[in-house]
Each structure stands twice: as structure tokens, then as C-alpha cells.
Amino acid sequence: MGWFWANAASKPHGKFPPGAVCPIDHSGTAAVCPVVVADDDIEVLNPLNNMPMAISSQKAPGQKIILSTERTISLIPRGELLDQGNWEYPSPQQMLNAMLKKGKGQGIDEEAVTSMVDVHNFLNEGAWQQILDWEKPHTLETRVEPRLEKFTGRPHDLSPRAQTYLFLGKIFPETFNTQPPFDRHDWTVLRSKGRNEGWEKVRYVIDYYGAPDDEDTGMPAFMLDTRPALDSVTAASDRFERWFFPLWRRAMGDFSDRQ
């Protein structure tokens, strides 16, 4: 798990609609397949992120303020090949248009859209840093950095761990979560098998939790619970080692933060 505080540039302002902490609707299942050409009644989606293939950068009808059309390049490598570059986030204008198109932008404070994009991007970058930390033992072995193949949002699906925490929160409310995560992502990470040896696909589950604003700065705080999904022997081993070895070191009197 890891805590994240938004910086001054990303601090939300204006009035957020309910459930708008993670404004992109990633719901649905992404599949690795060519884009299906659809008729006028069916959305053409990017199979890697379940977002419209061509999100308009034009000002929406009735829009009151001008939003930036500049897109931010993430630090997250995309796909198997180096020439695929890094993932690119939608601009604030594209974000607003996407929400309006999906029927999720009604009544939204337009002045808050830029901050919503900043927070969303900030959390995704934080999630990737946590994934890099999990992948570090494998990266040290292969000397090849992992990459992100695709991601799928599952905001309405509670992970088994989130369900467990909620159950324990009813019994031990001072220790465990009493509120569900506001979002969940499943990310398919490409882990190198060795230089020029191809990639292994590893699914990561990320639960996004809100937290009270920082008392000193007033900045919003978030907690990301990032871990490999328990769908392989390697993932189970990684999670066991992550839990067991720090516990063993503390039992032996080593209270450092080394992993």
C-alpha cells in the first residue's frame, strides 16, 4: 500500500459531482484485438483502455470556459516495443467531452475538470511506481524494465481484499477500512523473460481509497493498494515474500524499512 498527497497544482477546486474522483469511466473488459468498426449507434473503443478512439478536442455545446487541449505524456512505457512510446493522458477538454458522451458530465463544475485530470494522472503515476517496486526483483534479474500493455477499470467490482477489509471493518472499525475503494483498476504488465526473450503478462489489481485531507497542507490524500493478482504461482510467491521477509526481519530485531 502507499499514501499519496496531491501537490498544489493538482489540488481539486470547484465542486466535484458524486463519484468523480476518478473521472474516466474505465468500466468494461478490454481485450487485445483489432478495433471493431461499429455503426453510428455503437461506440468505437480503444481495446487497450476502453476509451473512445477519437475523443473530441472541440469545445462542447454550452461549455462556459476554455479548457486546455494539451495532452500529458506519462512515465509509463506502452506495449512491447520501444517505438510505442509511453501512455498519453487525455486533455482536460477531451476528459470533459468523454464524460459528457458517456452521460457522466451533467452538472459538473467545468473549473474542476483540470484538477480532476491532474489527480487522475497523479494517481496513475503513483500506481506505476508501486508496480515498479513490486517488479524490482524480476527487473534486477533480467535488466529489462517492465511495460504496461493495457488497463481495465472495474469501479463496481470489489476485489477479494477490499471485501475482506470491509468485513473486518465492521468488527474492527478502528483498524480496517469501513468505506470501499472509490475505484479499482486491473493493469496488465509486461514482465521481461530476458533480453530478446519476450514478455510474461502479469495482472495487477489496484484499489484506490480516499483519505482525509492532510492536516498541515489541506491537500487531498489517497491510498493505493497495489499488488499482483493471485492468479499464478509466481504472483502468490511474490506476495508471500513481500509479507513474510519484512515480518521475519522485524522478528529478528531489524526495524529498518529495507525490503
Image (tube, rainbow, N blue to C red):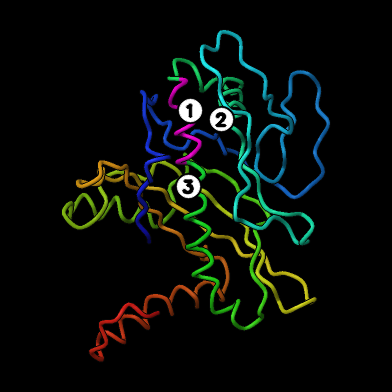
Q: Is residue 94 above or below residue 151?
A: above
Point out residue 228 in the picture as x, y percentages from the top left corner: 52, 65
Which residue does the image show at 59% across and 78% down from the upper left?
138
Q: CA distance from mark 3 to mark 1?
A: 14 Å
Residue 113, numbered label = 1
What secondary structure is marked by label 3?
A: helix
Q: Is residue 228 above or below residue 209?
A: below
Which residue does the image show at 40% across and 79% down from the upper left?
259
Q: Amino acid at mark 3?
A: Phe
Quarter assignment of residue 168? bottom left
Q: CA distance from mark 2 to mark 3?
A: 14 Å
Answer with mark 3 or mark 1, whichever residue precedes in sequence. Answer: 1
| Magenta stretch: includes residue 32 | no
What span is in magenta? 110-119
Residue 122, numbered label = 3
Q: Which residue does the numbered mark 2 point to in the structure image?
A: 92
* Contact between labelled residues 1 and 2, with CB atoms less than 8 Å apart: yes
What secondary structure is marked by label 2?
A: helix
